[in-house]
Image: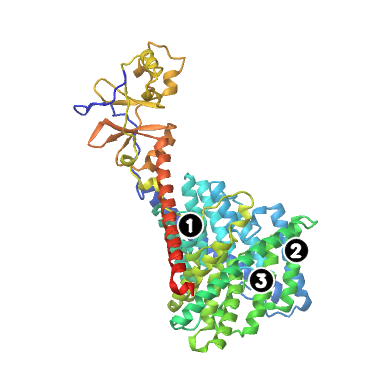
Amino acid sequence: MPSGAVPVAPGLTDTLIDARIPRKTILVDKRVVLISAISIVLAIAAAFIAQFLTALIGLVTNLCFHGRWSLAFSAPAPNHLGLWVIAIPALGGIVVGAMARWGSAAIRGHGIPEAMEQVLLNESRIAPRITFLKPVSSAIAIGTGGPFGAEGPIIATGGALGSLIGQVLRVTATERKILLAAGAAAGMAAVFGSPVSAVILAIELLLFELRPRSLIPVALATTTAAGIRYALVGSQAVFAMPAIVTPGGGALAFYVALGAALGFVSVGVTWLVYAIEDGFDHLPVHWMWWPAIGGVVVGIVGYFAPLTLGVGYTNIEQIVSGNFTAQALMFLCVMKFLSWSIALGSGTSGGTLAPLFTIGGAFGGVAGFAALSLFPHLGIDPRIAGLVGMAAIFAGASRALLTSVVFAFETTLQPAGILPLLGGCAAAYLVSSLTMRDTIMTAKIARRGVRVPTEYAADYLDQVLVRDSASRKLVTLKTTDVLGDIRRWMASGDARAQFLGYPVIDDAGNARGIITRRELLDPAHAELTRIGDLLTQPPLVVYEDHSLREAADHMVEHNVGSVIVVAREAPRKITGVLTRGDLVTAHSRRLKETRDADRHIRIRQTIRKTLHRNKPESRL
């Protein structure tokens, strides 16, 4: 008959030798060493692909705008093409549209949303042909005057290469995701020499986690790629700017307010980009022609504003160096946005970081000039305002806060700009989070029903131990009990007979397994059957010091709803049972704690408001 207590086994027996017990979670293992080695090799390849892409963009630009054969990276402006400048981006759009239709539609766009989608939905599997089609299509789009940066395509290409390697080798889906992120981050580090921000970008936009087993390979990959770039190109700042001084309190407050303003601008930019994309969806022509239509707009804008053509890295350097007037900055800001937003909405291939930096930097520079004339005593520097503007608009549009701050520092190497950058980007991030649900990186895939993680909180179940959640009121059965007697007991109305599962012990009190209520009532089993004969697998056991995450994974792996709990010092004694309901209860405690904290905050706010209203001076 059922018993309420289990005696301690007098010694170590063979009862639990075959018991299935989850392994304790470890930070890293030998597989991390292997993935790290693969990531380093991947980074070497990505670094040279980045140089190849840069040379290819230079070649197409020189051929189309300057009529010369050269791999040197150059800007489309100045040129002597006159009205012919309108046709070149349109021709590039035709080629890109054809490549997208008959090669792969995945090359459309700036690459990061597409990589995110593959990470979230397709176990980080990217079609191998993207590794070739993405850089070539981007080189054509940018080389023919497309107002994009090279960073998006090389990030997408590096990610595709990492995914390809992960598909060729025998790795898990998680390891393939790490290789994808390592390739993408290595590509970014190889273009800008920004290894730290590349790691953060991978965490914020691709990995959706911060764990040693993913951080280590990605960090080694970006270190390798940046080192190769230093050896080939040099370690100087990508966007060189004159030395700046640490701002005072008044100037710092302005930069934070500027960041908040750029937060609203980033929301508007994101909304307009997708509104334009929706407009293209209603055109009565096949989507392969949309890049050509966008190219016509790029060409027209480029005819009147040649600086809007191409990647515009020199424009960013001129902004942070203070070499533009306020009027020139405003003109560049408006025209670059017009050209870039329509080209991006048309579905061509190119990145968003450089255009956003140009638009935000120009906006910030204009605001800096205006504030300097109105408040000269604050010591506001239009160059710092431009620096804050370019990082803040990207932080608001992508909500990659730390990436924006660190990237702006790594590409300018100005430590005095870190504090304004942090304050401005945090303000932009706050405004964006309050006013916009999806970002410029996630809105496209969110429309297709993809849910993108927005927070990287510690796993609550990993913080709670089994001993704090296990059920202690046990009703055990013995292996020698007869099924018919147990069924009559279950029909007696005893409250203890309503449990969904019961631990089973032998005559020595050793755990033998768990049997469910369904198994006990199964009519296929004869009444004279002994309970021990119904046990078909070794006992599933967790220790008191296992985490609920380890226990939950154990349950899922073996498709059970409960496991036996034992103590390490007495591994044959059942001390409790952990069920799925106990896991839900643990989560409910977390929710209750959060609700209680929110309620206390609201109560304190109400008390303060009441006291303020009752002050004598408030009634005067």
Residue 574 vs 480, above or below: the answer is below
In the rendered structure, find residue 292 and report the number of the disc placed on it: 2
Q: Mark 3 highlights which residue?
A: 337
Depth check: 285 or 11 in front?
Answer: 11
Q: Percent from the top left, x then y, of residue 247?
A: 45, 82
Residue type at numbered disc 3: Phe
Depth check: 40 or 203 in front?
Answer: 203
Q: Percent from the top left, x then y, of residue 613?
A: 47, 68
Q: Secondary structure at mark 3?
A: helix
Q: Secondary structure at mark 2?
A: helix
What is the spatial separation of the Cα atoms under label 1 and label 3, in whole angstroms?
31 Å
**Residue contact at pointers 2 and 3, CB within 8 angstroms:** no
Q: Mark 1 highlights which residue?
A: 182
Q: Secondary structure at mark 1?
A: helix
Residue type at numbered disc 1: Ala
Q: Percent from the top left, x then y, of residue 197?
A: 47, 65
Quadrant assignment for the N terminus:
top left
Mark 1 residue crowding within 10 angstroms, few (<14) / some (14–19) / many (20+): many
> Which residue lies at the image location 70% right of the left edge and 56% below the top edge?
99
**Residue contact at pointers 1 and 2, CB within 8 angstroms:** no
What is the spatial separation of the Cα atoms under label 2 and label 3, in whole angstroms?
18 Å
Q: Earlier in the sequence, mark 1 or mark 2?
A: 1
The image's colouring method is: rainbow
Mark 3 residue crowding within 10 angstroms, few (<14) / some (14–19) / many (20+): many
Q: Percent from the top left, x then y, of residue 234?
A: 48, 74
